[in-house]
Every structure is written in C-alpha cells, then in structure tokens.
Image (cartoon, coloured by chain):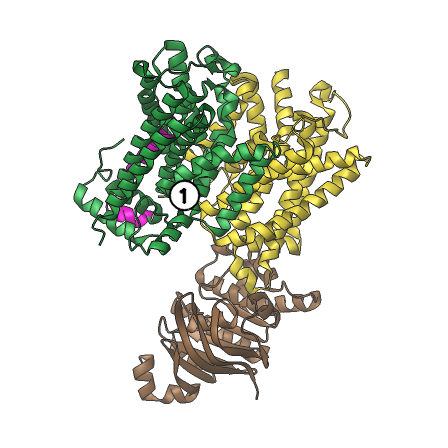
Chain colours: A green, B yellow, C brown
Amino acid sequence: MNTASPTMRTFTLGLAVWVFAAVVPTLLMSNYHLFQLTMVVVYAIAILGLAILTGFNGQISLGHGAFYAIGAYVTAVLMYQYNVPYWATLPVSAIVCAGVGFLIGLPALRLGGLYLALTTFALAVAVPQILKVNALEDLTGGVQGLVIDKPDPPFGIDMSADQWIYLFALGVGGLLFLLAWNIVRGRTGRAMMAVRDHALAAEAMGIDIALLKTRTFALSALYTGVAGSLGAIVIQFVAPDSFSIFVSIYFFVGLLVGGVSSIAGAILGGAFIEFVPNLAESVSKAAPGAVYGIILIAVMFLMPSGAAGAIGSLVRRSFRLGTKSAQLRATEVGGASARNVSAAAGVAHGAGSDAGGSSGL
Amino acid sequence: MEGVLHQVLSGIASGGIYASVALALVMIYQATHHVNFAQGEMATLSTYIALTLINAGLSYWIAFVITVVVSFILGVLIERILMRPMNDAPVLASVGVFIGLLLIINASTGWMFDYTIKTFPTPFSGGPVLFSGYVSGHELGSTVVTLVVLIAVYLFFRHTKLGLAMRAAAFNPVSSRLVGIRVGWMLALGWGLAAGIGAIAGMMVAPIVFLDPNMMAGILLYAFAGALLGGIDNPLGAVLGGFAVGIIENLAGAYLVGTSLKLTVALVIIVAVLVVKPSGLFGRTVMSRV
Amino acid sequence: MSALLETKGLHAGYGETRVLHGIDFSVEQGGVTALLGANGAGKTTTLRAICGMVRITGGEILLANEKIDGKATEDIVQRGVAHVPDGRGTFVELTVEENLRLGAFLRNDRVGVAEDFERVFGYFPRLRERYRQQAGTLSGGEQQMLAIARALLLRPKLLLLDEPSFGLAPLIVQEIFGIMHQIRADEGVSILLVEQNASLALDIAEQAYLLETGRIVVSGLAAEIRRDDSIRRSYLGY
C-alpha cells in the first residue's frame, strides 16, 4: 500500500523531473537545443504567471506580454546602462513588475471577464509604441533596442555559457514553480479560486476580494516579468518590435492549450509555444499563427482543460487515483467549484482580515 | 487655428472608420455579449479580397460591392459554424475561440497575400482639395461613405421588420423565440452585417495606412476605445464615440503626445472610461463586477 | 368538443432534475383550462414544455392532433401558440409599439394586423396612451397587459398564460382578469391558464387540474372543484 500522500507523490515527481531536466539535457544536448530548452523554461514561467491570474483567479489577461517586456527591459537597461550583473537584475525586475502589476490590478478590479480582456488587449497593442517613445530613447535604445552580453558560468566552472544559462533558468524556474505550487495548494490558492468561482459567496465569507485580486495581479506580473528578464538574458537582445501583441496572444494560447489552471500545464504550454513555431515555420511564415489558431479552437471545443487536463484525466483513469494532485489538477474552465468556496471559508475564519495568509509575494 | 481645423476634419474622416468598426463590435456584443477580437482581421481579409478583385480588372465599385457581399457571407458562416456552440460557454473559452479565429485569419491572410506592404486604390481623387485644402478627396469621400453606411444601418434597425427582429433577438432571445423569431439566424445576420461593415471600413482606411496583414490592429484599438467611450451596448453611442476618438486622437497626436504615441491615447481613453464610467457616455447597463 | 391541446404521460425537466412525472391533461377547443398548484409544483415547467423551452424526457404533446413535443419553440409558435411567460417577458428596451409589432411578427396580413391592433387597444386603452414609451417604464400591471396584447396579436389558437396575477396589486389583477373574461368571450381562443391564485382561475375556467410536485392530483370541472370543500381546504388553502 502506498503510504505517501498525494502531496508527497507530486513533490517527488516534480523533483525527479527537475533533476532529470538539470542533468540529462546539460550533458547530452547541443548548445542550440539547450537554448531552445531554456526558452521553454522561460515561457513556462511566463505562462505560469498568466495561469496564476487567469487560471486560478479568473482574471482574463490578453496583455501579459507587457509585463514580459517590462521585465526584459529592466534587465537590459540595468545590464547595458549600469553594468548590473545579470542575476542581480532579477530581484529588481521582480519588484518593478509586481509594482506595475499591482497598479494595473487596481483599475482592473472594476472590470471582469470581457472588459478586462479588452483592456489588457489594448495595453498589449500599445506596448511597442510606448517602448519606442523618443523621450526614453537614451535609456531604452529606441527602435534599435539594446544588445546585452551573455553571462559566463560563475567561478570559472568548465561549461558552455549556454549550459550555464540553462541551469540558471532551470534553477530560477524550479524555485518559482515550487513557490507557485505552494501558494496554489494553500489557503491563498483556495481564496483565489473561491473568488474566481463564486466571488459573491467568497466575499460573504470574509475574503477581501479587492486585496486578493490586486495581489494576485502583482504576483502574476512578477512571474511573467522575471520570465521576461530571463528571456532577455538568453536572447541577449531587446527591441520594441519583439514585444508585439502576438507575445501576449501566444502566452494566452500556451496557457489554454497547456491547461488553464494547471501548474504542470504551464510547462506544456511553454514547450508548445517554443517548438510549434519552429516546426511550423518550415512550412511557411504564416503557418505558426494558423497552427496556434486551429489548435486553440480545437482545444476549446474538445478539451477545455487543455493538455494537462486531458493527461490528468488519462492518468487518473489509468491508475484509478482517488484524489487529484494539485499539480495535475485541471479544474474546468470557469466551472464553479463549491469545494473551493467552503474551503476558503477556513481562510476567512482562521486568518482574520488577511486572506492572503501565506508568506506573500 | 487652421491646424486645429485640419486636425479636426481629419479626425472626423478617421473617426468615421473607427465609428464603423465600433458599430460592428457593438452589434455583435449586443447580440451575443461577446467581443469579436477577430473583427480587425476579418476586415483586413476583406480588403485583400477587394484588392485581388481590383487587380483582376474589375472596376472599384463593383469590387467594393462583391467584397461586401462576400464578407457578409463569411460573417454568417463564421457565426453558424464557430460561434453557435460558444453561446453558453464560459467567457474564457469564448475569448479563446475569438483569439484562435484572429490567429487563423491573420495567418491565412499572410499566407494568401504575403507580408509585403501594398497600396490600395481610392476612388476619390486627389490631394487636399476641398475646404481650402483642409480635407483631401479621399478623406471627404471616406467620410461620406461611412456616414451613408451608418445611416443605412440605423434606418435598417429602426424601421424594418427584420431590423426590429434582430434587435429583439439581441435584447431578449427567449421572448424573441416566443414571437416566432429564429434567433440563431438573427445572430448570424448580425455577424454578416458586422463583417460587411468591417469590410467597408477596411477599404476606406487602406489607402491611408497601406495594406498589410496587421493593418487593422491599431484601428481595432481605436474602435474599442470608441465603442467603450460611447457605451458598448449602445450602437448610436458607439458611433459617436468612434468619431470622438478620431478627433481626440488627431488633436492629441498633433499637439500633445506626438504621432508616435497615438495608440497610447486610445489606451488611456479605454482605461479612463472603464475606471470613471464603465457604461460609457451613453450606455445603459452598469457593470456589477465584484 | 375536441381537445385542442393534449398531453399524455408528459415527463420533463431541467438537466438532471426531473420536474414533471407523467401528466395528462387537455385544453378544449375554445375553452379555458386552469392549471393550479403551489410553487414548485411544475406549472411553469408544463407551459415551457408545451413551447419547447424545456427538455421533454417522456410522453407526448398533441396540438390539434399533431405531435409538437421535440419541436423548436419557433415552430410551435408558428402553429398558433402564444405564450405569456412568467415575469411577462416584455422587451423592456423597446417601445410599446415595437413590442406589439413583434407580437405580429409572423403575420403577413397588414389589414388583419391593423384590425387586431385596434381590438387590443380596445381591451387595453392604456397601451394606446403609452404607445411610444419604452416598455421598461411601464408599471407592472401595464407590462402584463402589454404581454397579453402582444400574445393576442399573433391571433393564436392557444394562449398560454403563466401567473398573470403575479406581483400585481389586487385591483390591477381584478382589472386584468375582467379583461380576460372579455377576451375569452370575444376571441374564441383556447386558454391554458397557470395560476397560484386558485379562486380567480377557477372563476374563469371550465376545466381545472391541480399539480403537486409534478403530478396531477385533482382534475375535473372547475365549478365542481370550487364547490368541493375538502379539495379547497386541503389543496387550495381557502
């Protein structure tokens, strides 16, 4: 009889995957493939940020590319203009993006569903223009953008820069995923989901919705912003036109295809948006968009919980697992979950007025 | 002062285009409570179709009419095939489908017509002509065309039986069924009309901004801003909003923020409206979002 | 006299929930049938089932001997069934005039429609006064009149009325039921009346059925049910 709890099982599984990912590709893969894998990690983190906001908290964002861009530019500017070491830019980026996320989260409180989607869409369309603004050209490099140096492995360790960046990204990613998993599993996560499913009921049970939603926005922006920073470091280049509306759209596609409220799904989504364009582009320049669109629509019709949801159901059916682990859980898109509301009641009673009980951002 | 007049008149011309697209958005929103994120791409595709017809030798206005009809049909088909199942789906799923549609149409347009920028002809001759050089021939012509379209749509909805049925179906589908209206087809017609209007908008704007697969992205943004400003459930308001955005955008671009930041103006309008008065200047429904 | 509407063993419900468990009743040609019962008995569900607005899971519905169960609402309406739903179903954003025009949507005979407009104003003069007003600004009673007028403009064979007295002041209810007596006398339309207010309903109906949790527990002539003390006390509460 397996005595390990589902949580332990999930944690062990995640850890094993992470260790495997750290060791095997680093030793076996070429630099170019490692680069691609690194981008998978970067996108996975970005999509995880979106999952936190949209999947677990129900706030639809079509503009997360904006945070990705902010994070990328914070890193690039600090490295290029001020010679800040690459790793030190991450915490700064995190704070800046969290702050911006919180600020955007405030007016977003008034909006729901469609209106928020619309506004974030507008934000995303405006981003390249904002980045090209003449007044900031000295800082941002204007239309041409900025080129930054590739970091070298520390302490003179004998590995290629690509290998090091991969491990670095994996390290940051592992930490962020672990953090997200903890938050989602805990009281904050339940409060988030309660607000998503039954906002009125959640409020009646004492959850401070405004605070929760803005903090979720901040957290979500932090994740995608850090991803942007990593992305800038990996690609070594930022320019306004790299951050068009399509970045936001592709994150959205990756989220829905991978599994909208699934942590593991973010990884699937990241892999999806890294590899699909590569494969599709060999057909024609237009193919990636069409493939995304077709798969997205197919997923919406056939598997609304995305790949993670489908895999999760398959696994549960094959192994007849009784409880869903948090990592493979894929709650229905927008489906009501009374379970979360009553579970969140524990949040209200236990934690007083502060529903975001866990060790915050 | 002259400069202001010129900007205002130009703003009215572009405002006419924004108003048309805003109207298309509001029509679909009223009927389905969905925002058609793919509206811009559909209009772009229509414009390419028009260009193909013109290049094949057809006269401008014949190509124009055929394009509008074809767009209408495409709109109806999209609604019947894709959107019908999404009527009761959660918001996220329907947004997903709209974004998917956006991607597919955008990609198809790029694939069929490649990504080079193309010029699009205007049937309205020449450079700054009228009102002592404040308005170009095309700006005047395009304003007239969009006004004609808007008035025609208004008359259709107010004074025809079919228009009344479509409004009824948008407001109250259940009661509409009870008087014998085929609600599904009303929705499809609404989509067709919206697609047709979008096509006209595309053909009017293409001569100014040149034609490429991403032509309508900015226009869509201004249209959103106009629709929200006027009231997203109010067609007349949306039209007025579209014109207002055109004028504001031009004036702000000329005197406040420079032309390179015009899109940001749209963004600011959107945020301002949603924060200050979400139902827009003339809208009726009040959003109660927790 | 033959039945215009007949249900046989009708089962219906919403999704997983079964509401009607096999009911049989009929509406005579030109007659008024009352469907009574408490809240949740299934009265509204019955009307919705007749109109194709609710899933029918068993049994059948015959309109003039034609099976209409499973047909779409629009098709049933086309066969001459006008439903005044609970909550009245007014198009509140549209004007009184537009509401009425929608009632006549399926009709092509302009002269006939014009005549019917006049007749309807005869029953409800207030609607002529408020002709261009937005329907949402009308009082509850006026909206009920508008809803009935709209239904009449279809020139229906069968009129379904769902709780016309609901939420209205007693005086207005009296007025409306008074007009309904008139309509019933003049129009020759068959009426299926769902009501919680049993005495009003029994006053105007010939046949009556009593629904309790999805089953018919009492059926018969309205006059007899009205006279029967035990039924009145145990089921109708007065």
Give the mark count.
1
Quadrant for the C terminus of chain B in the image: top left
Q: Is residue A201 magenta?
A: yes
Label 1: few (<14), some or many (≥20) within 10 Å?
Answer: many
x, y (%) of residue A3? 20, 50
Disc 1 is attached to a residue of which chain? A
Start-end of magenta stretch:
A199-225
Q: Main secondary structure of the magenta part?
A: helix
Visible in this render: residue B76? yes
x, y (%) of residue B78? 61, 48
Residue in view at x 33 percent, y 84 percent? C232
Give the structural element (helix, strand or loop) at label 1.
loop
x, y (%) of residue A173? 34, 30
The correct choice, above or below, for A141 with respect to C62 in the image is above
x, y (%) of residue A306? 44, 46
Residue in view at x 56 percent, y 67 percent? C72
The residue under label 1 is which amino acid type?
Answer: Val
Q: Is residue A287 magenta?
A: no
Name the residue beneath numbered marker 1: A260
Residue in view at x 42 percent, y 22 percent? A234
